[in-house]
């Protein structure tokens, strides 16, 4: 599955998506001089949308006409390679106009079934399914993070359990800054498989910045996850999620030992609210002593004792201001993923199609407008998590913004041609 994606990545994406206005596009594309002026203007405004060799000059090459949409696109030659200049108001591969696809993909953010979308918007359900999957061929990190300075210092990582045609699989998920920055399907939850899955995020992040390594990663206690992340980012500091301690106790004791659970929850909250590393460590030690002294039920004491033994992996978060002490952000994104997977009844095709599907879902989540209440909370004029991360947008239309951000496949340093 990952091998198929790697073979796709080895073929550089040579499509440059630019924000042409639909009304004036025909006049510009038919006039080579006006077309060159527009391209030169975009090179000056947004050089990251073009290959670095653009500054050495380029030649006008030829034109291609889509009889389906009656749209002409031009190609230019940069060095020895030809690049297609694609207007952002048209979907990739000329499958549809962006304005026609935008409401459909926005509704897919809420998991409206493809059958219902086909009934309302026309086409068939497979057309819209392919439309949702197509962004998944782009780099999630490179498309979402347009400047290496915005790469996150702190990430959260976990696996979502799912299935492909009834066989168990695990979606290695990486989040930061309210964005899904990595999703990849693993065959199993072993170290080797998870390293390959999380490695997709590592490869895409290092395409943006070859020296990139996050400072911290917050995870649950699964050893394979932690080992995989250390293999990918040897300098990373791993933090254990404090919330998982409470969840572990709640799942085993809330109903059977209600009063004790409430008291333990209060004491755990007191530990979490400690303002310093020393205070936190002291409160955890006192909690463990109290649990031992009062003979709390074993299902509770075992969790508290385990937290005490791994105290260093919890308290290290105080050494990194801004690090995630809990997996709250990750859990919010994975709840959305859980609803998405349940509504689609999981994956029904190949591992490769499952990978494209969940990657396309991730980019829609990053770029589609947030709830108006969320936008009002930030009150910064940006409508989506990706816009808030980058502090700008290429286009007012969120889908066009996604397509422009995915210029060259979202890769900042595209790989050379395969031999």
Image (cartoon, helix red, strand yellow):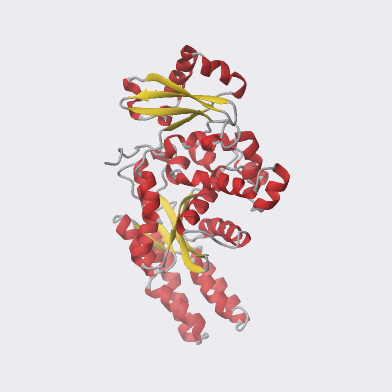
Q: Position of residue 329 (x, y in %)?
A: 53, 55
View extreme (right): residue: 120
Vertical relation: 283 (above or below) 24: below
Q: Position of residue 200 (x, y in %)?
A: 38, 52
Residue 83 vs residue 205, the one in the foreground:
83
Query: How many labels sit on residues?
Result: 0
Q: Residue at x 50, y 41 (%)?
A: 389
Residue 369 visible in rendering: yes
Split into 4 quadrants, where in the image is the N terminus? bottom left
View extreme (front): residue: 67
View extreme (left): residue: 419
> In the image, 351: left or right of 395?
left
Q: Residue at x 36, y 51 (%)?
A: 202
Vertical relation: 335 (above or below) 287: above
Residue 325 vs residue 140, the one in the foreground:
140
Q: Position of residue 150 (x, y in %)?
A: 43, 41
Q: Position of residue 220 (x, y in %)?
A: 44, 66
Q: Residue at x 68, y 52 (%)?
A: 115
Residue 214 visible in rendering: no
Q: Residue at x 40, y 33 (%)?
A: 14
> In the image, 419: left or right of 200?
left
> In the image, 143: left or right of 339?
left
Residue 393 vs residue 316, the one in the foreground:
393
Split into 4 quadrants, where in the image is the C terminus? top left
């Amino acid at each position: 599955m990952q091998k198929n994606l790697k073979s796709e990545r080895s073929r550089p994406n040579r499509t440059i998506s630019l924000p042409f206005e639909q009304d004036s596009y025909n006049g510009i594309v038919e006039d080579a001089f006006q077309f060159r002026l527009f391209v030169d203007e975009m090179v000056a405004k947004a050089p990251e949308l073009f290959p670095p060799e653009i500054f050495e000059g380029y030649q006008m090459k030829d034109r291609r006409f889509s009889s389906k949409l009656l749209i002409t696109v031009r190609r230019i030659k940069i060095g020895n390679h030809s690049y297609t200049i694609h207007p952002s108001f048209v979907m990739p591969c000329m499958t549809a106009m962006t304005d026609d696809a935008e409401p459909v993909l926005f509704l897919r953010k809420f998991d409206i079934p493809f059958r219902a979308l086909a009934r309302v918007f026309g086409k068939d359900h497979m057309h819209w399914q392919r439309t949702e999957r197509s962004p998944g061929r782009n780099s999630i990190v490179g498309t979402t993070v347009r400047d290496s300075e915005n790469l996150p210092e702190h990430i959260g990582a976990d696996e979502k359990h799912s299935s492909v045609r009834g066989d168990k699989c695990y979606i290695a998920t990486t989040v930061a800054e309210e964005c899904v920055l990595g999703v990849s399907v693993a065959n199993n939850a072993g170290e080797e498989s998870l390293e390959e899955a999380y490695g997709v995020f590592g490869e895409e992040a290092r395409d943006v910045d070859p020296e990139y390594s996050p400072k911290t990663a917050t995870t649950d206690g699964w050893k394979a996850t932690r080992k995989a992340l250390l293999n990918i980012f040897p300098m990373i500091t791993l933090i254990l999620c404090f919330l998982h301690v409470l969840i572990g106790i709640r799942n085993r004791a809330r109903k059977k030992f209600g009063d004790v659970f409430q008291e333990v929850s209060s004491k755990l909250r007191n530990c979490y609210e400690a303002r310093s590393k020393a205070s936190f460590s002291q409160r955890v030690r006192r909690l463990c002593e109290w649990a031992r002294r009062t003979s709390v039920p074993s299902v509770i004491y075992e969790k508290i004792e385990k937290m005490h033994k791994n105290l260093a992996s919890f308290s290290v978060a105080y050494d990194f201001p801004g690090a995630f002490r809990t997996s709250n952000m990750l859990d919010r994104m994975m709840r959305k993923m859980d609803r998405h997977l349940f509504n689609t009844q999981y994956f029904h095709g190949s591992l490769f199609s499952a990978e494209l599907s969940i990657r396309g879902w991730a980019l829609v989540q990053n770029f589609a407008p947030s709830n108006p209440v969320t936008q009002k909370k930030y009150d910064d004029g940006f409508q989506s998590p990706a816009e808030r991360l980058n502090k700008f947008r290429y286009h007012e239309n969120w889908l066009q913004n996604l397509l422009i951000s995915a210029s060259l496949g979202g890769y900042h340093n595209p790989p050379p041609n395969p031999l």
